[in-house]
Amino acid sequence: MQENFIIGVNYWPARKAMYWWKAFDAVEVERDFACLSSHHINTIRVFLTWEDFQPRPDQVNKTSLDNLLITADLAAKHNLSLMPTFFCGHMSGVNWIPSWALQSKEQSQRFPVYSQGNLNMRIIRNFYHDQEIQQAQVLQIQKICSVLRGHPAISIYDLGNESSNCCIPDHREAGRKWLRAMSTAIHEGHPGSAITLGMHAEDLEENRHLWPQDVARYCSLLSMHGYPFYLSWVDEEDVYLLPFLGIITSWLGGAPVLFQEFGWPNKPSHIEQKAGQYNLVKTTLWSEDQIDDFYRRSLPLLQAAGMRGAFGWCFADYAPQLYDQPPLKENSHERYFGLTRWDGSVKPALVTLGSWAGKPCLPPKLPSWLLHEDPDRFYDDPIDNLQRWFKAYKREMTVGLP
């Protein structure tokens, strides 16, 4: 039977952002889900902020569990599938980590940590090696699966969002053992459910000891995230990056790929500009029409490359009252990625994304420039490989174009 291309959206509410579970509002969620369903979106990826779901290593918060079940019920009501993402974790330039999963000492690092209401630079305990943290993660999986087991809205579980931005295993075997332990917990807690891991382009640029080859051993589906404006080796507007990253991930893992995140921030409205710090964005901002064009060009390329689906980043622009809070104060471009405006009105790109619902998945094809390459040698020099192969891919895709 022909699979349909999955059309999804990464979800945070416009007026709550990463503080959603602290101030859960079922009416807000139902309104948002009704909007997405009416525009033919079929899958919603949600993020289980670690501190909100697991305030102690031996305790999973019952209120958060109840609200997650309400969220799943609302998804089912609106004919949506739900993809819960565990241990979140990295999000929008900040690592959201419970205090019990942090070391006491601080050090200079790329991403600040948000814990107990404040940003800090405490070191995250490496959950690929720390048995206490792994036991806590298994407990979270067990409790969540016990609540969601058999629920008609649950299509797939996600083991984390860009987890290598939090910590990195010292070697591949540690990554494999962690994947084995987490996937086993899901299979025992919710038999028959699918599993993925939210990987991103930096997992291809560097050897972070979480190879797609290893992830594919324990996950039903690989996932990839791609934003050309974050990468130094492509033009910031290059739409071909997205299918290329998916092709490389699928080739390495020998498994199908869901393109789980893509998008672009748009220029803010006059009201949002007045809210301040508009000049502190970290990338070019586009008009809504330009972003719609980016979606129109991306989706057929992703389908043709054999991706299982595409998820827009993200549901909504965030309301100005959140601009002085992490992560939007420090990363102001993150305010404007939405497929809807913060007042709930719909942008053109959401209509374009939804128009792909019901289209078939196409079989992946191994490109000629990969035929004689060895996946197990990729991480010998990943950046050089990516640069060379991207040029070959672009030549192949643009031959005969004006």
Image (spheres, rainbow, N blue to C red):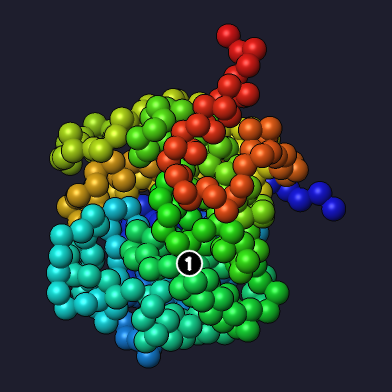
* Vertical position of residue 375 compared to residue 272: above or below: below
**Measured from the top left, where is residue 294 in percent x and y?**
49, 29
- Residue 315 in view in this figure: no
Residue depicted at x 45% and y 44%: 381
Residue depicted at x 40% and y 27%: 235
* Vertical position of residue 223 compared to residue 351: above or below: below
* Quadrant in the picture for the C terminus: top right
Q: Position of 238 compared to 372: left or right?
A: left
* Vertical position of residue 354 compared to residue 288: above or below: below
Toward which corner of the image does residue 364 lie, by quadrant? top right
Q: Secondary structure at mark 1?
A: helix
- Residue 73 in view in this figure: yes
**Measured from the top left, where is residue 206 in percent x and y?**
40, 50
Toward which corner of the image does residue 123 lie, by quadrant? bottom left
Q: Which residue is mark 1?
A: 172
**Measured from the top left, where is residue 256 in percent x and y?**
66, 52
**Measured from the top left, where is residue 117 in percent x and y?**
19, 70
Toward which corner of the image does residue 270 lie, by quadrant? top left
Amino acid carrying label 1: it is: Arg
